[in-house]
Image (cartoon, rainbow, N blue to C red):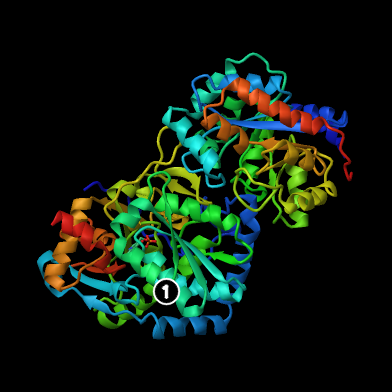
């Protein structure tokens, strides 16, 4: 397993994972590289989010929705049989148990409330695995908004269950036939659409990517994962804080939300990318979809077409804050292959009775392969975010198993 | 205070001089590398009376372009077009008598770094640069090195741009100001958007730099209408649809002559 970005010792002191610096910067990454027609819309989102996030009324309304509709807090589950086999203490943060079945709902409920506060009546979203699309469709139905979801044709084929769920929830699903017909192209198309719809629509970005303030705002909406897990670890772990905190990284929202809860602890942070979508591990500096970050590119500077069995990790870049955490050495980014992820999914199903999303299975695959080695010594405690459940992937898995 | 005309670069001086004779400015666009003999389109544009020519460097993810220019970009990339090859083709050209302006997305500028990129443009005989995903507040990294290399970076203004920011854009833009006529992507439209007149009116209050109106201008009638509000027009998707449909340089010259004639007609400008 290729092992890519190093940790630096000691873990750098904090201030990391706070508010970005001026002009939405995380180190040299981030920014608002939006077409002029979207700059004002981004500024309005930024202003509205700052106000809302400082408003206890908004926070309270969101916390209530997360509790009564999304089912938070999610449990911390010790993976007993797997831990025994691997020789490490593995705990799973169960985002798969949220309503709609993944962490995406945390961010969407926040942005949907914000959209209402801003007087918007429609949500625009891109989706890869369909989980963000389903979450958007769900929040729209719940709060009386419309939803338009852009999805690559290839993802429409492999995540058919979620396409049906979105339509059942009343969302419009727009197939995208350009490029690799996956998440990257769906994101481009959602941005194009937003340019013509800024007056009445909010672009509900699904990960910690996009122009400022999205990477920061989405991380803040996802930090509930890390905050809950921090408190749960404090209550349940002998050491209080896990030695390692692990999450899969597509754009990086479940990882950012998880890491945010542990940035000021000595825990080692590990982001696991798909071998064919390793923006943080193998990308180079670039600008795409509104932000400066790391992207897989060819020798001419054209963005590479990523390939992953997990539609939600099939993205050529990574959120700007992850690029910064990598440069700092505060987090480390590793990759696993399709086969390793599928193997991990089966193993979790058979040892713990949990069928994970293929995205989340990537995080587990790293734990399985690293356990007992120098990167994850025997006896370590590991907190891993299980970002979603695997129902959506059964047709992909059926062909392989 | 410096005199804006004396301080202007070659592209801007050229456009100001032509505008000041009362001429409506025409900037046709072509995607570089779209066909094996693509530079013949540039000669045809110049022969048809273009005042400046925009050459697009195709990018894999053109997030501000509609289907026509997306398709043109894909076609050019599939043919093996790249920044290096397109600039090499341009360096081999005799002087067309009109300035060349390159447009592309910022990822391609960052690839070798703004300094190397601008130097390469200069060597290829390019005078200006348009980067639609580089708004004014992020542009400093490029504009300083571009100025040093003699490349004029034209900034885009949008109907959504608030007035103080519009003034900043007009002030920091070089060559001309690219006024985006509507809230949308590039592509042909049935009518000139009402937002075009409003935006150019607002720009007139803050600058006397040439203002070119682009996005959606596809017919002689629209060009003539646009000319009432702006110093000239950019015509991209209407050109590229014809190229994608197989039109050769002579066909394009004939099409652009109709736009040239429309711009040359007497018009009652509100100015
Ligand atoms: C279950 C699940 N996990 C992870 C991801 C990857 O997104 P992110 O890296 O933003 O958490 C997705 C995206 O679709 C997903 O559905």
Graded by Cα atoms within 10 Å as few (under 14), some (14 to 19) or many (20 or more), the crowding at tag 1 reads: many
Work out whether residue A18 can be spotted.
no
Q: Please tell me which residue is depicted at 49% across the width and 74% down the height of the picture.
A: A110
Q: Name the side, left or right, on which B217 lies relative to A276.
A: right
Picture quarter with the C terminus of chain A = bottom left
Q: Please tell me which residue is depicted at 35% across the width and 81% down the height of the picture.
A: A73
Q: Is mark 1 within 8 Å of ligand 1?
A: no
Work out whether residue B223 can be spotted.
yes
Which chain contains the residue that carries disc 1? A
According to the picture, the residue beneath numbered tag 1 turns out to be A138
- Quarter assignment of residue B16: top right
Residue B154 position within the rendered picture, expressed as x and y whole percent measured from the top left: 69, 38
Q: Name the side, left or right, on which A246 lies relative to B257.
A: left
Quick one: which residue is furthest to the left in this view? A85
For the residue labelled by badge 1, is the local secondary structure a helix, a strand or a loop?
helix
Residue A103 position within the rendered picture, expressed as x and y whole percent measured from the top left: 36, 70
Residue B17 position within the rendered picture, expressed as x and y whole percent measured from the top left: 84, 27
Q: Name the side, left or right, on which A209 lies relative to A181.
A: right
Q: Name the side, left or right, on which B85 lies relative to A357.
A: right
- Quarter assignment of residue B25: top right
Position above or below: A314 against A61: above
The quadrant of the picture showing ligand 1 is bottom left
Please name whichever residue, B100 or B170, is drawn nearer the observer in this view of the structure: B100
Residue B219 position within the rendered picture, expressed as x and y whole percent measured from the top left: 69, 38
Please name whichever residue, A184 or A277, is drawn nearer the observer in this view of the structure: A184
Q: Please tell me which residue is depicted at 61% across the width and 24% down the height of the picture.
A: B251
Q: How many marks?
A: 1
């Amino acid at each position: 397993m290729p092992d890519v970005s190093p940790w630096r010792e000691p873990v750098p002191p904090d201030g990391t994972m706070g508010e970005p610096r001026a002009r939405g910067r995380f180190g040299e990454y981030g920014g608002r590289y939006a077409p002029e027609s979207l700059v004002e819309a981004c500024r309005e989102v930024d202003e509205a989010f700052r106000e809302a996030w400082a408003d206890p009324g908004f926070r309270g309304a969101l916390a209530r929705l997360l509790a009564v509709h999304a089912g938070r807090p999610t449990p911390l589950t010790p993976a007993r049989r797997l831990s025994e086999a691997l020789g490490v203490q593995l705990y799973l943060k169960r985002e798969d148990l949220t309503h709609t079945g993944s962490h995406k709902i945390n961010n969407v409920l926040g942005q949907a409330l914000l959209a209402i506060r801003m007087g918007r009546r429609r949500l625009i979203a891109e989706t890869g695995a369909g989980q963000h699309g389903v979450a958007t469709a769900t929040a729209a139905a719940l709060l009386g908004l419309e939803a338009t979801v852009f999805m690559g044709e290839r993802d429409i084929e492999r995540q058919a269950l979620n396409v049906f769920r979105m339509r059942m929830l009343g969302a419009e699903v727009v197939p995208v036939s350009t490029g690799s017909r996956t998440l990257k192209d769906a994101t481009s198309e959602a941005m194009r659409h937003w340019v013509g719809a800024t007056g009445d629509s909010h672009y509900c970005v699904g990960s910690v990517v996009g122009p400022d303030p999205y990477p920061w705002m989405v991380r803040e909406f996802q930090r509930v994962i890390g905050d809950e897990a921090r408190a749960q670890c404090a209550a349940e772990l002998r050491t209080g804080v896990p030695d390692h905190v692990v999450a899969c990284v597509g754009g990086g929202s479940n990882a950012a939300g998880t890491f945010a809860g542990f940035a000021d602890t000595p825990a080692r942070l590990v982001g696991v990318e798909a071998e064919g979508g390793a923006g943080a591990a193998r990308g180079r500096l670039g600008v795409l979809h509104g932000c400066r970050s790391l992207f897989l590119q060819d020798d001419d500077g054209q963005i590479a077409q990523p390939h992953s069995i997990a539609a939600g990790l099939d993205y050529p870049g990574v959120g700007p804050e992850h690029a910064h955490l990598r440069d700092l050495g505060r987090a480390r980014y590793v990759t696993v292959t399709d086969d390793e992820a599928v193997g991990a999914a089966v193993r979790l199903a058979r040892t713990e009775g949990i069928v994970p999303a293929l995205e989340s299975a990537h995080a587990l695959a790293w734990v399985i392969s690293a356990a007992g080695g120098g990167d994850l010594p025997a006896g370590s405690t590991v907190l891993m975010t299980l970002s979603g459940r695997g129902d959506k992937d059964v047709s992909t898995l059926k062909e392989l198993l | 205070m410096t005199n804006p005309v004396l301080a202007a670069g070659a592209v801007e001086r050229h456009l100001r001089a032509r505008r000041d004779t009362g001429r409506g400015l025409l900037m046709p666009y072509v995607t570089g590398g779209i066909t094996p003999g693509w530079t013949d389109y540039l000669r045809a544009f110049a022969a048809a009376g273009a005042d400046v020519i925009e050459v697009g460097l195709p990018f894999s993810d053109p997030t501000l372009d509609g289907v026509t220019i997306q398709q043109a970009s894909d076609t050019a990339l599939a043919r093996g077009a790249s920044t290096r090859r397109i600039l090499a083709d341009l360096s081999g050209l005799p002087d067309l008598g009109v300035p060349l302006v390159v447009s592309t997305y910022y990822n391609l500028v960052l690839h070798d770094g703004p300094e190397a990129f601008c130097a390469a443009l200069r060597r290829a005989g390019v005078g200006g640069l348009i980067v639609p995903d580089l708004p004014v507040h992020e542009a400093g990294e490029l504009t300083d090195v571009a100025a040093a290399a003699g490349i004029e970076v034209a900034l885009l203004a949008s109907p959504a741009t608030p007035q103080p920011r519009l003034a900043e854009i007009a002030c920091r833009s070089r060559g001309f100001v690219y006024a985006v006529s509507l809230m949308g992507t590039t592509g042909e439209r049935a009518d000139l958007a009402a937002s075009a007149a409003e935006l150019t009116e607002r720009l007139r209050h803050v600058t006397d730099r040439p203002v070119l109106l682009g996005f959606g201008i596809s017919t002689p009638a629209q060009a003539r209408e646009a000319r009432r509000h702006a110093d000239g027009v950019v015509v991209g998707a209407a050109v590229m649809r014809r190229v994608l449909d197989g039109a050769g340089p002579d066909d394009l010259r004939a099409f652009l002559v109709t736009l040239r004639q429309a711009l040359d007609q007497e018009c009652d400008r509100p100015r």
